[in-house]
Image (tube, grey):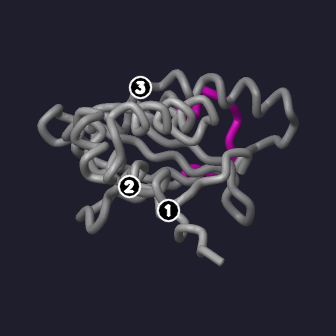
Amino acid sequence: MSHQLDALDLKILAALQADASRSIGAIAEAVNLSQNACWRRIKLLEEAGVIRGRVALLDAQQLGCGVTVFVRLSAGEHSEGWLTAFAEKIRAMPEVVEFYRLSGDVDYLIKLQVRDIAAYDRAYKALIRAAPLRDVSAAFAMEELKHTHALPLPAPPSRA
């Protein structure tokens, strides 16, 4: 990590992960800093890439894409050209919300948000058109037990 985080940085990050829509003044008050000092720290965290962006979290159910599907793929090929072309096509699919290359028996894991089984079937057909695959299997989430975008923050550095 190129940016050394101190206890105040960690408090700011925790406050932002809890609610990034809060004003700088509210965050500054929560972490016991002046607004200017808090703003400067946030800007430094952004410049260092620790804060990649701030977004609104939307409700998939209310937007009509409340079915979560985890798709495991095994590739038919393992060349760099194949991966580049395949990844480009997968990233272009709006229902793909997460996409990982894995170690082990399964090559790729894709998380989809779709409306229903018919929407998943359309996504499945797009996946198998994207590139030759050896195996495709899917699991539908029955119940969401935990969903967070908050990362576990390191413990603040100890004072010597």
Q: Position of residue 92 (x, y in %)?
A: 52, 21
**Which amino acid lies under the numbered mark 2 shown in the image of this protein?**
Ala
Badges 1 and 3: C-beta atoms under 8 Å apart? Answer: no
Q: Name the residue under label 1.
A: 153
Q: Is mark 3 on a helix, strand or loop?
A: loop
Task: Reply above or below: 151 against 114.
Answer: below
Image marks 2 and 1: residues in contact by CB distance under 8 Å: yes
Corner quadrant of residue 45: top right
Asked which secondary structure carries label 2, the reply is: helix
Which element is circle 1 on?
loop
Query: Farthest residue in the left direction?
Result: 62
- The furthest residue to the bottom: 160
Tell me which residue sits at (23%, 64%) in the image: 143
Q: Judge left or right: residue 15 versus residue 48.
A: left
Q: Earlier in the sequence, mark 2 or mark 1?
A: 2
Which of the pair 95/74 is nearer the observer? 95
Residue 56 is labelled as none
Find out whether residue 69 is within the magenta segment.
no
Nearer the observer: mark 3 or 2; the answer is 2
Q: Tell me which numbered mark, 1 or 3, is placed earlier along the sequence.
A: 3
Residue pointed to by mark 3: 94
* Mark with earlier residue (3, 2): 2
| Mark 2, residue position | 14
- Find residue 85 and report its horizontal and vertical position in percent: 72, 24
Specify few, some or many for label 1: CA neighbours under 10 Å numbering under 14, 14-19, or 20 or more.
Answer: few
Q: Distance between the residues labelled 1 and 3?
A: 30 Å
In space, the residues marked 2 and 1 are separated at their CA atoms by 8 Å
- Specify the amino acid type for callout 3: Pro
